[in-house]
Image: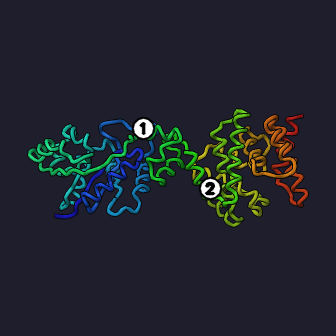
Amino acid sequence: MGEVICIFGGTYNPVHLGHMAAVRALLEQLSPNRLLVVPTAIPPHKQMPSKSPTAGQRVDMLHLAFDGLKNVEISDLEITRGGVSYTYDTAKELRKRYPDSELWLAIGEDMFASVEHWHRHSELFNIVSIAVFTRGNGNNLDELTDHFSSSYRSNVKNIKLDPIKISSTELRELLQQRSGTEYLSDPVYGYIIRNRLYDSKPNFEWLRTKAYEMLKPSRIAHVKGCEEEAVKLAVCWGADIDSAREAAILHDITKKLDIDDQLILCSKYGIITDEMERTNSQLLHSKTGAAVAKFEFGISDEVYNAILWHTTGKAGMTTLEKIIYLADCIEGTRDYKGVEKLRALAYENLDSALKCAMESSLAYLKQKGIVPHPNTKEALDYISDCKG
């Protein structure tokens, strides 16, 4: 007899900790030489929900979930074949590839009870043995097991598993509510957020953890203060609170990088820079931070622009862009002459506060002998003209 090969199929939409626990149970109790995780192309018994990831994205998530796990392979056999994914066709193909192997099919207890309704089940059970996930000792499966043993060439083995009680449908709903992280591995969750699959929104605690890891420890208090201030300003001026929170949490994620590292990011993300930015990391971190936030965390264009313009400002800023610019200036750890007046003004007249902040910034730069970026002067001229 050749290798022991186990087939573990499913839609994996998305792959979660329940699937990972099942794989570990199979490895421990069945000890296969190969455990083939096989994502379906088109499931035969249900429709893929709308806004599902592409087949390639589901495969990507499986690789992230099972990376480094010995004897586990991700097989795109059904996806490459296309059409409805019948298990019989998969088992038949694997029998051709591995003619001397001992093939096992892993299925759930509930599925085992209805498996004789599957496509060409009689032929399937002459190809594979059945590994059934069970919550207890499997005594309730004895009758079915005896039936299979007498009716087919299939062996049946119970795989004890304490299931993680979450369905893929429930998990997809949680992801839209900034929840569900406890049911996913961190690499898979990061992939989902980066690509905003399932209309997902990042859990803010997770987002803070990731952002703070990218900061100097001394900057974390500023970012926390900026988030708090941005939320209060968003409430005051009717901006989207969650977008303000995301932008504030992420606005400084490349701040600690020196100019050489900033320029490497510019090359990586195709960021266009001017002469002033190429020699000033304080200016450049807004652009690189926005790009990294877009790539790593899948932020919206609105949040991207709020991060992009939080240092220099620009003519014709949106409400969210003004909020992030001002929150960065007036958050609680800021302590400079005039900050208390600016804090009060920010909740009385947003444009007046923005004008005041930019005038203060230009005066500070002039005092230090630093040439300001033209965007700030253009922004100040624009808002001065609008205010008459």
The C terminus lies in quadrant: top right
Q: Secondary structure at mark 1?
A: helix
Q: Is residue 90 visible?
A: no
**Numbered circle sitting on residue 45:** none
Q: How far is the residue under mark 1 from the one under mark 2?
A: 30 Å
Instruction: Find disc 1 in the rendering and name its residue.
Output: 170
Name which quarter of the figure residue 281 lies in: bottom right
Instruction: Find disc 2 in the rendering and name its residue.
Output: 212
In the picture as drawn, the residue positioned furthest to the left comes out as 150
The N terminus lies in quadrant: bottom left
Left or right placement of residue 261 versus residue 86 in this view: right
Q: In x, y percent, where is residue 149?
A: 11, 47
Left or right placement of residue 288 versus residue 141 in this view: right
Residue placed at 39% from the left, 41% from the top? 166
Name which quarter of the figure residue 34 lies in: bottom left
Q: In x, y percent, where is residue 40?
A: 34, 46
In the picture as drawn, the residue positioned furthest to the top comes out as 238
Residue placed at 30% from the left, 55% from the top? 25
Q: Nearer the viewer, residue 98 or 189?
A: 189
Q: Amino acid at mark 1?
A: Glu
Q: Nearer the viewer, residue 338 or 168?
A: 338
How is this picture coloured?
rainbow
> Is 42 above or below relative to 363?
above
Left or right placement of residue 266 versus residue 279 in this view: left
Q: Secondary structure at mark 2?
A: helix
Q: In x, y percent, where is residue 128?
A: 19, 51
Structural crowding at the residue carrying mark 2, measured as other residues with C-alpha within 10 Å and reported as few (<14), some (14–19) or many (≥20): many
**Disc 1 or 2, which lies upstream in sequence?**
1
Q: In x, y percent, where is residue 335?
A: 81, 52
Q: Amino acid at mark 2?
A: Tyr
Residue placed at 67% from the left, 61% from the top? 216
